[in-house]
Amino acid sequence: MSELLEPLNLTESTQELVAAEAADRLDRWLSAQLSDLSRSRLQKLIEQGAVRLNGAVCCNKKVAIAPGDRVQLMLPPVEPMALLPEAIPLEILYEDETLLIVNKPAGLVVHPAPGHPDGTLVNAILAHCGDQLTGVGGLQRPGIVHRLDKDTTGAIVVAKTEAALHHLQAQIQAKTAQRDYLGVVHGVPKAAAGTVDQPIGRHPKDRKRQAVVSATKGRSAITHWRVQERLGNYTLMHYRLETGRTHQIRVHSAYLGHPVVGDLQYGGGRSVGVNLTGQALHAAQLSLIHPVSGEKVVAVAPLPKAFVTLLEQLRARQ
């Protein structure tokens, strides 16, 4: 799940990073810091002289990074994709002039990206909101406060004004906004509840996946979990995110030895005999402070039909 947009904005022409402690060689260290860029892409940028180490151009991808080193990465301009409104149905949980909360279905990508130029949640909200989102949060992710994986369902908030966007992102950073998830996992945890506090970064062998890695190669990731219901050899889990790294719940669940049911990337593709539309992970509740009124807004997203069917069948098997 990542589910939260990383504070690093890769659309900027120059990014400056500082090494907190001794790390790996330059290309590997950059790859761990910038999960949206592949290691091969970073190596090419280094070779092209787009990286400065402590103020000097560095074309050596193998140079070691030391504590306090300052690394500047100069990215070439990105050609924006043309975003067009598309009349994609939205299940609206809450809406006013400032924000919109929808229940995202499985299979819907949040914003356009390579391989998904259209048919996204952004295209849908452009059709729903019209010109209201113009200039809010940039051209490619208008109004997007945080993300959900393509096949993760549930509540996601969209800001309709620039002020609301910054206010909501600050709430998530400060952990005053709460994101509660439900997921069905393989196996039964021995404890009733716990916390996974393990850094997450790019998988060392598969750039399309994330993994629990060392602190020098990943970013802090904290997931609180508790058992909601035991279902034979499966468990309905409740999760609360303290951070929002890419695929966080899915990676941490697999790290616990209890991968999310239906998760082809981290669960080994084990079948449960139920036709799922994605992994059994649902953003069930989103709680935040309204950017204008200051009142608490709580949006509850009903479980998708496939998730309900899975629970019914697992209960029946007992």
Image (spheres, rainbow, N blue to C red):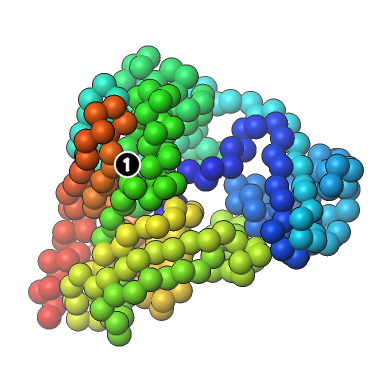
Identified by mark 1, the residue type is Ile
Name the secondary structure under disc 1. strand
Image coordinates of residue 185 in percent, x first then y, are 31, 71
Residue at image mark 1: 156
Name the side, left or right, on which 45 lies relative to 258: right
What residue occupies the far front of the structure in this picture?
A: 294
Residue in the image at 72% along x and 35% along y: 14
User: In which image quadrant can residue 164 be found?
Assistant: top left
On the image, the x and y values in percent for residue 136 come to: 44, 23
Question: Which image quadrant for residue 235?
Answer: bottom left
Q: Is residue 68 left or right of residue 293?
A: right
Q: Using the image, determine if residue 302 lies above or below residue 207.
A: above
Residue at the spot x=18%, y=76% of the render? Answer: 231
The residue lying furthest to the top in this view is 131
**Residue 122 seen anywhere in this rendered image of the structure:** no
Residue 120 horizontal/vertical position (percent): 40, 35
Q: Quadrant of the C terminus?
A: bottom left
Can you say which quadrant of the picture contains the N terminus?
A: bottom left
